[in-house]
Image (tube, rainbow, N blue to C red):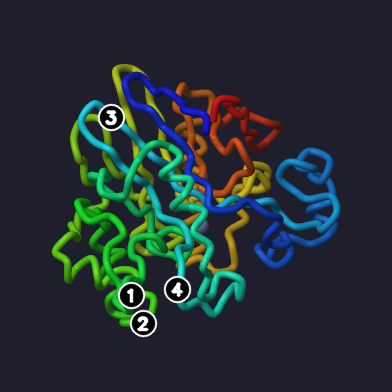
């Protein structure tokens, strides 16, 4: 597992899986076969599977080690969880993510903080695990940082999702509800990037003059670099998410900020650069 160094901060991807997943035409209302065709050569085979026509999208966390803290950003799908969609995530027993975390040299008890960019199914699953029929925090010595707006929206649903993934954290008194611009210290802080969900945040990292930003589901696929106005059908507010995505891309295009994506194909990490009237991604090989 490659380690990316951002000043004194080390960053590692902890991958749960990486497979051809959604079809562009199912993911975006705007994506017709004619609209996607001009981008196929640019996206294949890395981001768009030539055999299946599906977008290749990992589900992964970022393990961040600063001088002071051991941090996880997002916690993937998890095990034994109730999912209606997609069916292969329902009641999964695959523990590969936990094995990959241990292979990175970190035991769950060593995690100081978990940050969730938002609380969708592929970003909160390992928050908890099932032990003797009870949902308990996977990370026993951790403070879980949830954006207050995101938490409140999920709490009001009071769904199985909340009961399995979030409520046990509250009950264990390990949840910390924060504003959308919360700063843990001068090396890690949140930035509101709402639209995908009501309380979606990006996580910024800084060490000296070195910067990185984990963008969560603000951008799902490189296809949106060519078409930044395409928002997934399941967004909370597609107009706001488009505006937020464009602002993020403009801010970081040709900057030194290393962007850590949630779902771009491996190595998932890179720089935003211009391409025609849109953007491209220059992958950082060590990611
Ligand atoms: Zn996601």
User: CB of residue at label 3: within 8 Å of ligand 1?
Assistant: no
State the residue at coordinates (33%, 75%): 162
Q: State which mark lies toward you, 4 or 2.
A: 4
Question: In the picture provided, is 100 more to the left or to the right than 157?
Answer: right
First in residue order: circle 4 vs circle 2: 4
User: CB of residue at label 2: within 8 Å of ligand 1?
Assistant: no
Q: Alpha-carbon neighbours of circle 4 within 10 Å: few (<14), some, or many (≥20)?
A: many
Residue bearing the label numbered 4: 81
Question: Observer-nearest residue: 60 or 109?
Answer: 109
Residue at disc 4, secondary structure = loop
Q: State the CA–CA distance, disc 1 to disc 2.
A: 5 Å
Residue at disc 1, secondary structure = helix
Q: Alpha-carbon neighbours of circle 1 within 10 Å: few (<14), some, or many (≥20)?
A: some
State the residue at coordinates (65%, 34%): 280
First in residue order: circle 2 vs circle 3: 3
Q: Find the residue positioned furthest to the front.
A: 132
Residue bearing the label numbered 1: 162
Proximity of marks 3 and 1: CB atoms separated by less than 8 Å: no
Q: State the CA–CA distance, disc 4 to disc 2.
A: 12 Å
**Can the viewer see residue 181 in this picture?**
no
Residue at disc 3, secondary structure = loop
Question: Observer-nearest residue: 114 or 110?
Answer: 110
Residue bearing the label numbered 2: 159
């Amino acid at each position: 597992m490659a380690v990316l160094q951002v000043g004194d901060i080390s960053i590692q991807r902890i991958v749960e899986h990486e497979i051809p997943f959604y079809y562009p035409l199912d993911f975006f209302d705007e994506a017709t076969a004619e609209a996607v065709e001009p981008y196929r050569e640019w996206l294949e085979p890395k981001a768009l599977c030539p055999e299946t026509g599906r977008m290749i999208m990992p589900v992964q966390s970022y393990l961040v080690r600063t001088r002071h803290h051991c941090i996880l950003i997002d916690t993937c799908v998890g095990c034994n969880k109730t999912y209606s969609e997609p069916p292969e995530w329902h009641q999964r027993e695959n523990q590969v993510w936990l094995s990959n975390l241990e292979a990175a040299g970190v035991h769950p008890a060593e995690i100081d903080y978990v940050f969730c960019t938002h609380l969708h199914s592929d970003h909160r699953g390992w928050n908890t695990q099932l032990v003797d029929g009870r949902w308990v925090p996977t990370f026993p010595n951790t403070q879980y940082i949830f954006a207050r707006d995101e938490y409140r929206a999920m709490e009001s649903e009071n769904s199985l999702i909340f009961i399995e993934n979030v409520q046990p954290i509250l009950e264990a008194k390990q949840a910390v509800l924060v504003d959308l611009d919360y700063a843990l210290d001068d090396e890690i802080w949140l930035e509101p990037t709402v639209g995908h969900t009501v309380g979606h945040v990006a996580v910024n990292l800084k060490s000296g003059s070195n910067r990185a930003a984990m963008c969560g589901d603000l951008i799902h696929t490189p296809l949106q670099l060519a078409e930044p106005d395409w928002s997934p059908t399941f967004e909370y507010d597609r107009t706001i998410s488009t505006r937020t995505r464009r602002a993020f891309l403009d801010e970081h295009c040709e900057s030194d900020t290393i962007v850590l994506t949630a779902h771009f194909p491996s190595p998932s990490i890179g720089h935003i650069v211009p391409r025609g009237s849109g953007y491209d991604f220059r992958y950082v090989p060590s990611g």
